[in-house]
Amino acid sequence: MSKKKRFVTIQILPDDLSEAWTLRLRYRFFEFLFYAAVIALFAVGFAAVKVVQIQGKVLLANHLAARNQELMEQQKKMEMLEQELAAVTDKEKAVRDILQAFLASTPVDSENSAPAPTSAANLDRYVENIRSVEHPLEDKDANLLREKQPSIWPVAGIVSQRFSTGGPEGRHDGIDILAAENTLVMSAAKGIVTESGWDPDLGRYVRVNHDFGVETVYGHLARSFVKPGDQLAKGSPLGLVGNTGRSLGPHLHFEIIFKGKPVDPMPYLQ
């Protein structure tokens, strides 16, 4: 005996009392809708889990890429240090060879067992030989030294307060340069950002290391574009002039620090 089919009848009655609309659906149609909704929910949940997993993998890949970039930069620094050490070693060896040759060519007084007075020509030739060793190394590092020396003005403006170690005006570790708010602030030399944060006196500030014991500080910024670890070229933008911290108006506080001690920036700036 066959199973009796069941139906659901839906009637729609218009407001104008015209003929009613009748819709007759089997129970199986609603069962199909139910199962389809359950499958759709499972599919959405599965897709959401997959999206979260993919996002996690993307974040991990970005982290690994950043770490790989840091390792590559450290490797480059190590290679540069090795090249510089090799250059210094070669220079020392060349100077030692020149000195030994010079001493070997110097006549000796047999009575006193001491070098006899040498001629001015021999001494001049010795000095020139030493200089010939010095110049190639200087030429090689000249561009690097120029790039890492803080010599350009970080912002165009008027110096309202100069560097001071004390006296009636008190200590001031840098110079204050008046400039309009949100004026672009540039790095005075090539270097690596070591700090980018907030100080009660300087407000929002950035600190850059230029190697050779030289650092620069940029204070009272309205905004900073950089974070620790960023590499800056000479003239790269790092922030905007502001009025943050202990400040009476928009300006940039600029410091040059040499071996841990503030120095007057004015002699460095072109």
Image (spheres, rainbow, N blue to C red):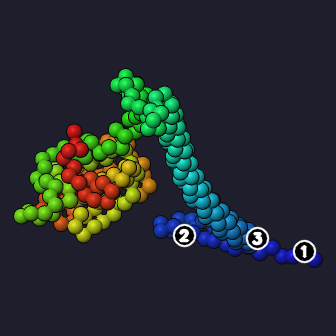
- Amino acid at dot 2: Leu
Question: Who comes first in sequence, dot 1 or dot 2?
Answer: 1
Residue appearing at x 34%, y 38% in the figure: 146
Q: Which residue in the protein does label 3 denote? A: 28
Q: Which residue in the protein does label 2 denote? A: 13
Kindly report the distance in space between the C-alpha atoms of the residues bearing marks 1 and 3: 16 Å
Q: Quadrant of the N terminus?
A: bottom right
Give the numbered dot on residue 2: 1
What crowding class fits label 1: few (fewer than 14 Cα within 10 Å), some (14-19), or many (20 or more)?
few
Residue 244 in view (yes/no): yes
What crowding class fits label 2: few (fewer than 14 Cα within 10 Å), some (14-19), or many (20 or more)?
few
Q: Quadrant of the C terminus?
A: top left
**Which SS class for mark 3?**
helix
Kindly report the distance in space between the C-alpha atoms of the residues bearing marks 2 and 3: 25 Å
Question: From the viewer's perspective, is 110 left or right of 262?
Answer: right
Q: Position of residue 181 (x, y in %)?
A: 19, 52
Q: Position of residue 143 (x, y in %)?
A: 38, 35
Q: Looking at the image, do the residues carrying marks 1 and 3 touch, with CB atoms under 8 Å apart?
A: no
- Amino acid at dot 1: Ser
Task: Give the camera-side residue of 167 and 44.
Answer: 167
- Amino acid at dot 3: Arg
Q: Position of residue 6 (x, y in %)?
A: 77, 75
